[in-house]
Image (spheres, rainbow, N blue to C red):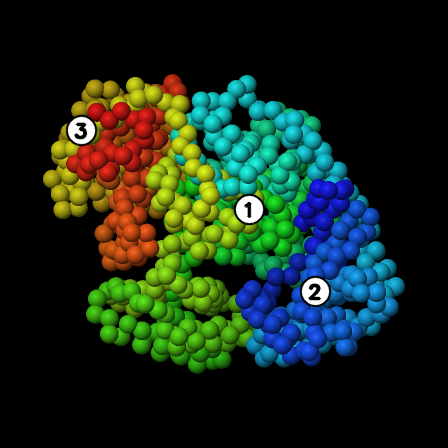
Amino acid sequence: MGAMATAAAQYVVAVRALCEFTAKQGDLDLRFTPSPTAQEGITGHAVVASRRSPGYEAEVSLSGSFGPLLVRGRADGYDPRLNRLEEVKTYRGDLGRMPDNHRHLHWAQVRIYGHLLCQSRGLDELQLALVYYDIGSQKETLLTEHLTADLLRQFFEDHCRRFLAWAEQEMAHRAARDLQLTALQFPHADFRPGQRVMAEAVYKSAVSGRCLLAQAPTGIGKTIGSLFPMLKASPGQALDKIFFLAAKTSGRALALEAVTRIRHSAPALPLRVLELVARDKACEHPDKACHGESCPLAQGFYDRLPQARSAAIDAGALDRESLRRVAAEHRVCPYYLSQEMASWSDVIVGDYNYYFDISAMLYGMASVNQWRVGVLVDEAHNMIDRARKMYSAEMEYGQLKALRRNAPPALKRGLDRVSKQWNSLGKEQEGDYLHYAEIPDAFVSALLQAVADITEYMVEHPAAMDSHLQQFYFDALHFTRMAELFGPHSLFDITRQSGQGTTLCIRNIVPAPFLAPRFAAARSTVMFSATLSPWHFYSDTLGIPADTAWIDVPSPFTADQLQVQLATGISTRFQHRERSLAPIVDLIAHQYRQQAGNYLMFFSSYDYLEKVATLCAAQHPEIPLWLQARRMDEREREDFLARFTESSQGVGFAVLGGAFAEGIDLPGARLIGAFIATLGLPQINPVNEQIMRRMGETFGNGYDYTYLYPGMQKVVQAAGRVIRTQQDRGVVYLIDDRFARPEVRQLLPAWWHVA
C-alpha cells in the first residue's frame, strides 16, 4: 500500500489506500454487481467532466502531510465557480443496491480530498459531491454535503491518526528490513558453479534498472541465485516489493523454500513473504456466494480484518497453509485476506497471471500505489504460450445455442441478434478454417448489446446467476474487450466443427504490445530459464525493452557426464511413423541391454507413444514399461513419477511438452537416460501456418519463430531431465534425421558433445 520516501523519514500513502485502511467496515459483499470496465470508467469520468462549466478542473493533483505521513492522490474534479469538489463513481444498474459500506468509503475519500484542496487553495469551506454515473443510462446522481475547512481538517487528522500507528510500524519494519538486507550474506557456504555469475548479473540489472534475460542450466540453483541478489539490491534501489512469478506449483514451492533458507540464515531479517493461491483453491465455502448473507467468512469481514491483518503480519511467512490458519482463527476469507496482505508483504510468490494478465492484481496494485518492484520470472520459456492465452478470446456457437434454448424472455432478443450476426459470419467460408482481416463491427455491436442486457438482467435478478449464463457473460465480456484491442499482434479466425457449429477466436500471436507496459512499470524484470535460445525470439515476441541484458551462464556440467547420441537413420515425420516403430523399439532394447536402469522415452503424440509401447511390450516383455495417459490427474502423475526410484528399472513413456518433459527432478539412478523421438515441432495445421505467415511479416523468420524454436526448446527441456547434479551420468538419444542439420544442432546446449 504505502511507499517509503527515502529523503526523509516519510511514509507515502495514496488517498484511496488510506481510506480503504481506515474507512472499510462491515461485510465483504461480492454479489453480482457488474462494475464497468476500466475503459468504461475512464469514458464515464470524461463524460461527466465534459458536462461541467468552463473553468472546471479535472484530475486535480493534491497532497498533504500529517507527521511522517504524506497523503497524495488525484481528485476527480473541482468547479471553482460552485466551489464544489467532485468524486465520480461509475456503476451499472440500481444505485439503491450499492452496499452502505461502499458509500461510506466513497464519502471518506471525497472528504480527505476536500481537506487537501482547502489546504492547498486556502479555502474556508467547500461543497463536496459524490457523482454516481450510470454507464447504461448515462444519468448522474449527485449527493452533496457542505463542510467547513476546520471540519475537513479534523476528519483528515482523525483518519491519519488511525493509520499512523500502522504507518510507523511499517516504517520501522522497512528500516529494519533494509538494514538486515544490506548486511545479508549468501545462505550457503559458497555459490555453486555458474550461480555467482547469475547472481551478479541479477544484482547489476536491479541497480541499473534494466531487464535481464538469463539462460542458466538446470542444477545451478537459479531460484536462490535470483532471489538473493534482488533482495540485496532492494535497500539501495528503494524497492517496495519483489514479485517471484512461476508457471507451475513446483516453481512456487522452490521459491518459498529459497526464501525460507534465506530467512533461516539471517534470523534478524524481518522478511514478510506471501504465497498467492487461486480463488477456487483458497475458497473454504465453494457452495456459498461471496457476501455476508451467504458466507460466514464474508459476514463482518472488514470488522475482523484489522486483527487478522496484524496476526498475519506477525506470522511473517504466509504460504497457503499458514495464511489459511490465520484466516480460520479470525473467521475471515483466506483468499481476500491474501489480497489484503499483498499490500504489506516484501516478497510475493504467485503465478504469471498476477502481474502479466490483462486484469492482473499485482500490476494494478503496483500502478495505483506507485510501488517500486523487482520482478523475477521463473522458467520464462513458458511465457510466450502463457501470455498468448492471456490475450486471446474464444467463443463457441454451441454455448450460445444452448443458452438461447433456456434463456429468460428478457434476454432472448439480444441473444437472437448475436446468433443472427454470428451465422452471417463466414457464410462464404468453404473450408473448416479461415482467418479474417478484421472482426465485423455488426457482430461486436450485437455482442456488446447482449452483454448490456445480461448485466441489467443480473442486477435486477441477482438470484438468477445460472452458471451457463454467467460463463457466457464472462466469455463475451473478454471477447469484446479483446476485440477493442485487436491489432496486428492477433488473428481473428473462424473454425467450423461438424455438428457443433463454429468457434470464433481472437488469437494473440505476439504478446509484446500487451506485456511491454508491464516491463516498463517494474524497476527491473529478470526472466530466467535453462532454455532461452535464441534470445531474440523471446525479446521480440515478449516486448522486452531494447536495453535488456542477456547472459548465457556456463554450465557446471561437463560433456563426459552426458552421452548425446544421434539416431539420424530414423525419420519421425508423420508420413514415416509406421516405419519408425521397429527401429525405435530396437534402440530402446539395445540401450537397456547395455545398461539397465530408469529411462524416459518422449514422443510427439499419445498415438505415437501407444504404438511404440505396444510393439515394445510384445517384443521385449522383460523391459518394464509405464505410460503417461491422456488427462492424468495429480495423483496419477505422482504415481507415474514414483516408479522412478534408486533401485527400479524400466522405461516411462511420455509426451514431449507434457507434465514429465520439464519441471521434474529425478537425480542419480532415478533417471539415467532419455530417448526423444521428435523435434517437438508444432503440428502443421491451418492455424500454425497462419501464425507462421504473421511471424514472417512481423519478424522476417516465420518458420523458425513458429516451428523450430518452440520445438527445440521442448527437446532441450526434456533432455535436461537426465543430468540434475554434478554427480549424475546419463545418455540422451535424439531420434530423427533432422537432428543432423546445422541449424538444429546450433540450438543444442554448448556443453553437449554430440556423437
Mark 2 or mark 3: which comes first in sequence? 2
Res. 60 mark: 2
* Closer mark to the observer between disc 1 and disc 3: 1
Residue 377 visible in rendering: no
Res. 522 mark: 1
Residue 173 picture quarter: top right
Mark 1 or mark 3: which comes first in sequence? 1
Mark 2 or mark 1: which comes first in sequence? 2
Q: CA distance from mark 2 to mark 3?
A: 73 Å
Amino acid residing under circle 2:
Val
Check contact, mark 1 vs mark 3: CB within 8 A.
no
Residue 45 visible in rendering: yes
Residue 583: x percent and y percent?
Answer: 14, 33
Placement of 434 over or under 134, stated as above or below = above
Instruction: Give the number of marks.
Output: 3
Residue at numbered disc 3: 587
How packed is label 2: few (under 14 Cα within 10 Å), some, or many (20 or more)? Answer: some
How packed is label 3: few (under 14 Cα within 10 Å), some, or many (20 or more)? Answer: some
Q: CA distance from mark 1 to mark 3?
A: 50 Å
Amino acid residing under circle 1:
Ala
Name the foreground residue: 11 vs 416: 11
Name the foreground residue: 422 vs 154: 154
100 left or right, relative to 32: right
Q: CA distance from mark 2 to mark 1?
A: 26 Å
Res. 642 mark: none
Report helix, strand or loop for mark 3: helix
| Image point (37%, 32%), residue name | 641
